[in-house]
């Protein structure tokens, strides 16, 4: 049980540090309930020794949030800001416990669903990386994403990014990302032309359906209105800008990825590597190398990532934007950012 309690406690501190006082409170209370063998211990039964990389607390929180969004636990709506409530830990916690008692099986099943955040803020890192590549290669871009969820980040060029002194992207976009970039800005004058958008996921979501929208909203922290607004705006963009999504694991899909002359092929992923098993990671890495070996000056290939890394073995974990380009395998660190994207600090 100590491993589970540690996972819950760490996630609670992360949520609080990243601006969700509500989830910091909830997870602290959940940990106490688990330790006291309460209803949440029953919900987590069988998962006591799961790896922290499975993000079980976020899966639980997503299940609870969906109960509030759907109105299946009406009392929760008084406390969830995403549906007009006001969070109060002392008054709200008994209603959360009651909802957990009434929906124990549902919440236990929710632990089997990987978080489908499709965090739109990460597009600030994606689009800056693509602008850098467009400036470097001067070719139309074919964009592929593994772990794409609903593919909202595949539409990154249709969002507006604001930074000190200016903005980039359509001014009338329903998605506006404030404080998107800092530091040495990406080449905003570069011509970015995305001619193909394809995504791969083991459980892709159709964000244009009611169920898909609810699933995505449920994994956004309910007291972070800016993230909720970005997500709702991105869903409206998805209804207008097509992207092809495939229900396939990365290790199965990538061997079929072809390079096309006269275009830049970019493979992108963000905060999904932890959800791959070690054998899957090894397979994907090997396939990326193989694709790179086929790159030519007229058909370059780039592996663009936003994932947690340590710059040195003793350094703190950071969320870094990196681009490895072929021919040649040149590896460049482009930027660092928060797990949810902005601000992206370019180097």
Image: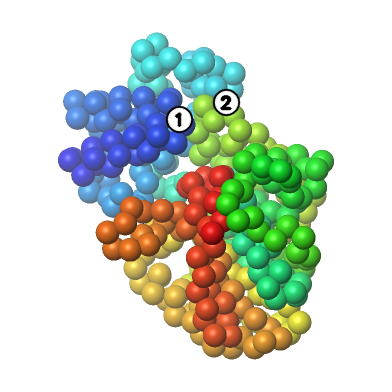
Q: Quadrant of the N terminus?
A: top left
State how many labels appear.
Answer: 2
- Which image quarter: residue 269? bottom right
Please name the residue shown 63% across and 71% down the image: 266
Dot 2 corresponds to which residue? 82
For mark 2, give the secondary structure: helix
Front position in the image: 148 or 223: 223
List the residue tagged with mark 1: 20
**Quarter of the view holding residue 201:** bottom right
From this viewpoint, is residue 198 visible?
Answer: no
Q: Residue at x 54, y 17 (%)?
A: 85
Q: Nearer the viewer, mark 2 or mark 1?
A: 1
Classify residue 260 by image quadrant. bottom right
**In this picture, residue 191 sits left or right of residue 53:** right
**Front-lying residue, 22 or 16:** 16
Which residue sits furthest top?
91
């Amino acid at each position: 049980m100590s491993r589970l309690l540690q996972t819950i406690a760490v996630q609670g501190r992360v949520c609080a540090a990243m601006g969700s006082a509500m989830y910091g409170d909830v997870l602290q209370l959940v940990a106490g309930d688990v330790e006291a063998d309460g209803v949440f211990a029953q919900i987590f039964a069988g998962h006591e020794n799961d790896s922290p990389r499975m993000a079980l607390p976020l899966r639980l929180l997503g299940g609870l949030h969906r109960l509030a969004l759907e109105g299946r636990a009406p009392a929760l709506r008084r406390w969830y800001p995403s549906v007009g409530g006001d969070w109060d830990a002392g008054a709200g916690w008994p209603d959360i416990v009651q909802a957990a008692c009434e929906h124990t099986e549902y919440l236990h099943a929710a632990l089997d669903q990987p978080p489908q955040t499709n965090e739109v803020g990460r597009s600030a890192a994606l689009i800056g990386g693509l602008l850098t590549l467009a400036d470097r290669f001067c070719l139309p871009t074919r964009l592929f994403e593994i772990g794409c969820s609903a593919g909202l980040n595949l539409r990154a060029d249709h969002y507006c990014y604001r930074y000190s002194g200016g903005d980039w992207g359509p001014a009338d976009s329903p998605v506006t990302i404030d404080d998107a970039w800092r530091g040495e800005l990406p080449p905003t004058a570069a011509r970015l032309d995305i001619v193909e958008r394809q995504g791969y996921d083991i459980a892709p979501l159709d964000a244009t359906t009611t169920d898909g929208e609810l699933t995505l909203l449920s994994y956004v922290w309910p007291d972070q209105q800016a993230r909720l607004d970005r997500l709702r705006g991105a869903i409206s963009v998805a209804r207008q800008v097509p992207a092809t999504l495939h229900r396939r694991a990365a290790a199965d899909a990538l061997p079929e990825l072809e390079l096309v002359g006269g275009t830049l092929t970019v493979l992108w992923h963000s905060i999904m590597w932890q959800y791959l098993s070690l054998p899957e990671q090894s397979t994907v890495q090997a396939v990326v190398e193989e694709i790179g070996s086929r790159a030519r000056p007229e058909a370059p290939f780039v592996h663009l990532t936003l994932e947690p890394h340590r710059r040195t073995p003793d350094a703190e974990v950071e969320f870094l934007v990196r681009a490895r380009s072929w021919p040649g395998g040149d590896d460049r660190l482009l930027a660092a950012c928060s797990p949810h994207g902005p601000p992206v600090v370019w180097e």
